Image (cartoon, rainbow, N blue to C red):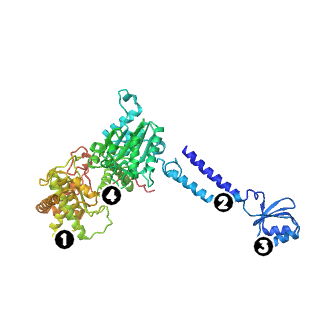
């Protein structure tokens, strides 16, 4: 209906312009006249072939003896009139003075056009219009269709079984409402999907759309708010009007925190456009008018900033937490994303899942894609375990920057720095096993030691935190042991930042400091940081000083512990540093061989065949060998045989 009205407006405007053009251009008086050059007209007059002439401003319309009408343009010359009179041609002259009606319309036309355009666009801005180029008040919600966006089902969702079960019940309610209503159950009005980025919240919503078989509208929270007052509230009303017409249906609001933040927190107060939009959303979700059959889904990774009125039952009856998957979930997710990827016989998704703790669903999808791109880059027919290892290193440590030029001194200092991290990490039992050490620049780092846990981490213990602090400070301790206090570089900057964050959490949040006690100061620190440092901590100066002293004490203890380990294991420390200088990259098992004085590269063709069911090694990841030139059985495209 709105599109038809919009088209009608433009048609009427076009017809009005055409009518005004005809009014001021003299109608269709020239449509029957053929154009003719002025010299031809003079020649016709002199030859006596002109029967009559009409002078109309700059135009000369004349009729020849055979009745044909012509038109030409008269130059600024009066001789044509004398010529016509001399030849005895009848001449008629028309006045160019406009009529009173034409003059009146011409004077009012600019003002009428401006007023009309102003009224039209103001209606659009206030939501009065339902479409068109300036449909500010119209909802931007899009209806997903299988033809345009494809069909996603719950079979495409893996690793988040509990969240999937919660939402499968909503789909069942849409399919068979009598199953629940006969016992007095009511369909949930809304469900809020909460979780970190990349865990599959939007994918779950698309799966509901594919399974439910009902209209599915999707919109982003930022699409509601504009610079014009009232536009957001108008879009909310329009969205729910569309939803009611298509009920039963599902409306999905992605990143709802863009519009659903706490009211009263902004500088705009009650007149803030975002707050008006939120108020309208609250009314539409659970106001006087019932929205039967309209289910609201929303996703956010910032539940803490949402308005409490938005979270209460009756608006979002269910809050579904979507977390990062565990090892079983990661294996299932890898299986889903690897459906269309040909895998080599050596690929074990269980081992890949074990070696990727903390990965979200989006991270795992990116891992499979990067592995496929790596295999395609070298011309394989299928993806091998080596490709997955290379892709994982690229994601976790960054892309290699082999083109970066490093001096011998810089390379040597990096090797000793990373060797310090690795030696301390291997020595302390509660540190995560060392997965790989490299002095090849990756991302923004000159070198890196990567550790991976043997299993999913659910909590962290006090002694484990102390050992992590020691491993973090081992890089600086290694530089000072090798080069002295005056030659230490800025390389430990990232380590110090990491250690400071961990020590502050131990003191201010986790109660791991006997002097500070079991008090949570993290909220006060968060408010201090949110205000840009203005106002200071909401604690006394003496308490703040005590916190800083405790943080410094924990970091210093970690440094002393790392320094003692490296001095006690100086031979292993030297061997590993020299090994990194020679080989540049070493895996966890290769590091163990180097510090024992053995060669890091041991060729064992039976490793791959016997490793499948073994217990986790020291690195908790599959054994890897140095990347070498692929052989004939590594999945490369066969080269054509030379012709005879």
Does residue 43 appear to the left or right of 448 in the view shown? right
Residue 77 disc label: 3
Residue bearing the label numbered 1 = 487
**Which residue is disc 4 drawn over?**
629
Spot occupied by residue 210 in the image (x, y as percentages of width and height)? 42, 39
Q: Earlier in the sequence, mark 3 or mark 1?
A: 3
Would residue 381 be seen by someone viewing this image from the given angle? no
Along the line of sight, the residue nearer the viewer: 272 or 452: 272
Q: Is residue 605 left or right of residue 155?
A: left
- Residue 132 is left or right of residue 249, and the answer is right
Using the image, tell me which numbered label, if any, was put on residue 106. 2
The reply to whether discs 3 and 4 touch (Cβ–Cβ < 8 Å) is no
Q: Disc 2 to disc 1, how far (Cα)?
A: 86 Å
Q: Is residue 243 above or below residue 58?
A: above
Q: Name the quarter where the C terminus is drawn.
A: bottom left
Question: Between 54 and 556, which is closer to the camera in this rendering?
Answer: 54
In the rendered image, the vertical position of residue 379 relative to residue 44, given as above or below = above
First in residue order: circle 3 vs circle 2: 3
Secondary structure under badge 3?
Answer: loop
Which element is circle 2 on? helix
Q: CA distance from mark 3 to mark 2?
A: 30 Å
Q: Is residue 396 above or below residue 169?
A: below
Q: How far separated are the C-alphas under marks 4 and 1? A: 40 Å
> Taking the image as drawn, is residue 553 in sight?
yes
Contact between labelled residues 1 and 2, with CB atoms less than 8 Å apart: no
Q: Is residue 548 above or below residue 384?
A: below
Work out whether mark 4 precedes mark 1 in sequence or the reverse, and give the earlier one.
1
- For the residue pair 372 and 90, the one nearer the viewer reads as 90
Name the front one of labels 3 and 4.
3
């Amino acid at each position: 209906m709105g599109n038809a009205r919009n088209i009608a407006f433009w048609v009427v405007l076009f017809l009005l312009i055409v009518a005004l053009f005809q009014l001021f251009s003299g109608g269709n008086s020239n449509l029957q006249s053929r154009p003719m050059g002025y010299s031809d007209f003079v020649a016709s007059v002199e030859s006596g072939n002109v029967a009559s002439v009409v002078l109309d401003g700059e135009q000369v319309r004349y009729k020849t003896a055979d009745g044909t009408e012509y038109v030409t343009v008269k130059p600024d010359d009066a001789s044509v009139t004398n010529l016509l009179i001399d030849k005895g041609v009848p001449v008629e002259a028309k006045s160019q003075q406009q009529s009173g009606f034409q003059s009146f319309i011409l004077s009012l036309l600019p003002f009428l056009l401006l007023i009309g355009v102003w009224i039209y666009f103001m209606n659009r801005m206030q939501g009065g219009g339902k479409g068109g180029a300036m449909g500010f008040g119209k909802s931007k919600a899009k209806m997903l269709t299988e033809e345009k966006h494809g069909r996603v089902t719950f079979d495409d969702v893996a690793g988040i079984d509990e969240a999937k079960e919660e939402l499968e019940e909503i789909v069942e309610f849409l399919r068979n409402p009598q199953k629940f209503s006969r016992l007095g159950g009511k369909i949930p009005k809304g469900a809020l999907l909460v979780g970190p980025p990349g865990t599959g919240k939007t994918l779950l919503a698309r799966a509901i759309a594919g399974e439910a078989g009902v209209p599915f509208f999707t919109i982003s929270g930022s699409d509601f708010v504009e610079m014009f007052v009232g536009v957001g509230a108008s879009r909310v009303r329009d969205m729910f009007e569309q939803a009611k017409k298509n009920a039963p249906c599902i409306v999905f609001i992605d990143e709802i925190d863009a519009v659903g933040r706490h009211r009263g927190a902004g500088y705009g107060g009650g007149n803030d456009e975002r707050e008006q939009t939120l108020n309208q959303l609250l009314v539409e979700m659970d106001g006087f008018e019932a929205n039967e059959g309209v289910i609201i889904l929303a996703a956010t990774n910032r539940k803490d900033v949402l308005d409490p009125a938005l979270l209460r039952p009756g608006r979002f009856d269910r809050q579904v937490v979507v977390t990062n998957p565990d090892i079983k979930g990661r294996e299932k997710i890898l299986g889903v994303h690897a459906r269309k990827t040909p895998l080599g016989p050596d690929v074990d998704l269980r081992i890949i899942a074990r070696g990727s703790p903390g990965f979200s669903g989006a991270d795992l999808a990116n891992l499979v894609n990067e592995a496929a791109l790596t295999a395609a880059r070298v011309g394989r027919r299928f993806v091998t375990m080596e490709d997955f290892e290379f892709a994982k290193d690229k994601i976790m440590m960054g892309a290699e920057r082999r083109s970066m030029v490093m001096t011998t001194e810089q390379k040597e200092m990096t090797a000793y720095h990373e060797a310090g991290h690795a030696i301390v990490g291997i020595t302390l039992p509660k540190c995560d096993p060392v997965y790989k050490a490299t002095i090849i620049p990756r991302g923004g780092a000159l070198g890196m030691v990567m550790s991976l846990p043997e299993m999913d981490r659910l909590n962290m213990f006090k002694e484990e935190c102390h050992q992590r602090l020691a491993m973090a400070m081992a890089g600086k301790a290694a530089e000072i042991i090798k080069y002295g206090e005056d030659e230490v570089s800025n390389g430990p900057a990232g380590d110090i930042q990491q250690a400071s964050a961990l020590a502050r959490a131990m003191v201010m949040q986790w109660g791991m400091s006997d002097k500070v006690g079991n008090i949570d100061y993290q909220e006060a620190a968060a408010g201090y940081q949110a205000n840009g440092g203005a106002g200071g901590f909401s604690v006394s100066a003496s308490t703040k000083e005590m916190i800083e002293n405790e943080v410094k004490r924990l970091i210093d203890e970690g440094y002393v512990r790392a320094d003692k380990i490296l001095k006690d294991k100086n031979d292993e420390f030297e061997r590993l540093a020299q090994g990194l200088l020679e080989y540049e990259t070493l895996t966890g098992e290769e590091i163990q061989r180097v510090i024992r004085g053995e060669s890091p590269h041991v060729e064992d063709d039976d490793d791959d065949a016997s490793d499948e069911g073994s217990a986790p090694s020291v690195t908790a990841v599959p054994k890897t060998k140095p990347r070498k030139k692929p052989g004939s059985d590594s999945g490369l495209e066969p080269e054509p045989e030379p012709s005879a």
